[in-house]
Image (cartoon, helix red, strand yellow):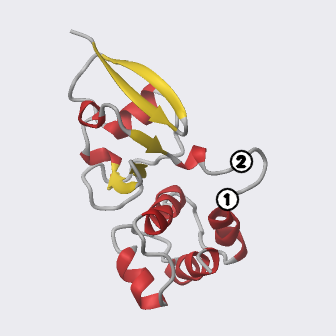
């Protein structure tokens, strides 16, 4: 049986047929909608590479069934830049050398976006590290990531 779910993705309303009700939001985004900026790391809620915003809140897309977010507003890394203009967070990540391999970067940036929409903008480096603790970086670029977030939130 094919279901249809309704999502607003990066500002665009979409009706999406779902063949398998067990498909995760992560697999729907990557495999059905080809929004591959959202990364799959652990696929079990431990690394944060799959972080997107659902109704303005940070979520691990690998832990949510797509059908469970029917009707939601989803923002992925592809929705951040406006035309050729990078979002200030993206620009700050570049200026602060906040990545090495870059695999975790979309999740880091979306999680940092969530800090704003959840009302945690600003603060000190320790607080930012704590709030970002769900996003792992195997290259250990944490200092640059923290600096970028603080810079973008000024
Ligand atoms: Fe979802 Fe790691 S891929 S938390």
Q: Residue at x 34, y 32 (%)?
A: 71
Question: Which of the marked residues, 2 or 1, is nearer the chain's N terminus?
Answer: 2
Q: Which residue: 41% across, 53% down?
A: 56
Q: Viewed as shown, does residue 131 lie left or right of 121?
A: left
Label 2 SS:
loop
- Mark 1: few/some/many CA within 10 Å (<14, 14-19, 20+): some
**CB contact under 8 Å: marks 2 and 1:** yes
Distance between mark 2 and mark 1 Cα atoms: 7 Å
Quadrant holding the C terminus: bottom right
Q: Is the residue marked 2 within 8 Å of ligand 1, measured from its CB? A: no
Q: Quadrant of the image for the N terminus?
A: top left
Question: Which sits in the foreground, 125 or 106?
Answer: 125
- Tell which residue pokes out farthest to the top in this image: 1
Residue 9: horizontal and vertical position, in percent? Answer: 49, 36
Instruction: Describe residue 83's horizontal placement relative to residue 56 as left or right.
Output: right
Q: Residue at x 40, y 86 (%)?
A: 127
Q: What residue did someone put label 2 on?
A: 82
Q: Which residue is mark 1?
A: 87
- Density class for disc 2 (Cα within 10 Å; few <14, some 14-19, many ≥20) is few
Q: Would you place residue 88 above or below residue 125 in this image? A: above
Q: Is mark 1 within 8 Å of ligand 1?
A: no
Q: Where is residue 109 drawn, in percent x and y?
A: 53, 62
Placement of 33 over or under 154, stated as above or below: above
Q: Picture coordinates of residue 76 (x, y %)?
A: 50, 46
Residue 119: image quadrant is bottom left
> Image height check: is 71 above or below 78?
above
- Residue 68 vs 92, above or below: the answer is above
Disc number for residue 120? none
Q: Kindly give the residue lying farthest to the front in the view shown.
A: 119
| Residue pictured at 36% horizontal, 35% vertical | 27
Element at badge 1?
loop
Across and down, in percent, residue 118 comes to 40, 66
């Amino acid at each position: 049986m094919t279901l249809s779910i309704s999502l607003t993705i990066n500002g665009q309303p979409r009706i999406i047929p779902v063949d398998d009700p067990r498909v995760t939001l992560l697999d729907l985004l990557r495999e059905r909608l080809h929004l591959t900026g959202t990364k799959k790391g652990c696929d079990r809620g431990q690394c944060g590479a799959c972080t997107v915003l659902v109704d303005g809140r940070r979520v691990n897309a690998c832990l949510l069934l797509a059908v469970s977010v029917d009707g939601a507003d989803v923002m992925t890394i592809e929705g951040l830049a406006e035309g050729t203009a990078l979002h200030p967070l993206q620009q700050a990540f570049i200026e602060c050398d906040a990545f090495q391999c870059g695999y975790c970067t979309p999740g880091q940036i979306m999680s940092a976006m969530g800090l704003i929409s959840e009302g945690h903008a600003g603060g000190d480096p320790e607080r930012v590290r704590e709030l970002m603790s769900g996003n792992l970086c195997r290259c250990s670029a944490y200092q640059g990531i923290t600096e970028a977030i603080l810079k973008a939130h000024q």
